[in-house]
Structure formats: C-alpha cells, structure tokens
Amino acid sequence: MGKELHLKLTVRLYTEDDQRCFGPGIATLLERVQKHKSLRAAAASMEMAYSKAWRIIRTAEGVFGCKMLSSTIGGQHGGGAVLTPEAERLLAAYRAYEADVTAYARGKFEDSFGFYRELDKE
C-alpha cells in the first residue's frame, strides 16, 4: 500500500459578494488575543503584520456589524485587548460548526475512499 491518506478541510465563511469574512485565520487570531491579551502579541505569535491583523479584524467587524475587540490604550501597564462577547460567540459557533463538519466529512471520506487500503491487494 502507498501512503496513508487523510482528509484536511478548512471552513471559511463568505459574504454574498464572495468577500472572505471568517475562517481559520481569524479564529486563530482571536484565540491568540484571548491568550496574549493583545492584538499585537497575537499577530506576532502568528508571524503576521499588526496592520494585517487589524485589517482582518476590521473586515469581520464590517461584515458582522459588531466590534470584535475591546482595546485599552497603553499607560503604566501597557494596553491590551480582549474579545467582545459577540466575538466570543462567533468564535465558539465557528469552532463548533468546524468540528461538526469535520466529523461528518471524515465519516463520508471513509465511506467513499476506505477501499483504497485494499487496492494493492487486488
């Protein structure tokens, strides 16, 4: 038998005019903001430009009509950012949907292509 096969899916949300607005990139960015309490640190942890991180956030805010981050400006202890309740809800919904789709797709993949393990034995 050749190499083991596996399925790799990505779930991306688009607007009716095909503008990408939510997917694995922004989901990871939001999770990193939760971890680092900073958009700048979240972007750096992904090796992403801070300006690109803001562009991604602003695109999602424009599409969903709500703020994604609640930010505080510097000062003695520095600034920071946390997710808004709306962003937390969108992130949780995205991750749950992604998990459901992946679980379903893995079953369908096995149903459709499970036979490949036997091809070299025929």
Image (cartoon, helix red, strand yellow):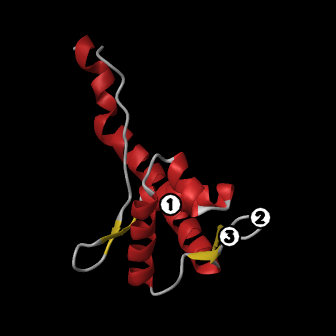
Secondary structure under badge 1?
helix
Q: Amino acid at mark 1?
A: Ala
| Residue 77, numbered circle | 2
Residue for badge 3: 74
Q: Amino acid at mark 3?
A: Gly
Secondary structure under badge 3?
loop
Residue 122 placement (x, y as % from top left): 22, 14
Secondary structure under badge 2?
loop
Q: Nearer the viewer, mark 3 or mark 1?
A: 3
* Residue 109 versus residue 94 in the image, above or below: above
Mark 3 neighbour class, 10 Å CA radius: few under 14, some 14 to 19, many 20 or more: few
Residue at position x 42%, y 45% in the image: 107
Residue 36 placement (x, y as % from top left): 66, 55
Say whether disc 3 or disc 1 marks the residue closer to the N-terminus.
1
State the residue lying farthest toward the bottom.
65
State the residue lying farthest toward the right.
76
Residue 118 placement (x, y as % from top left): 30, 20
* Residue 95 versus residue 93 in the image, above or below: above
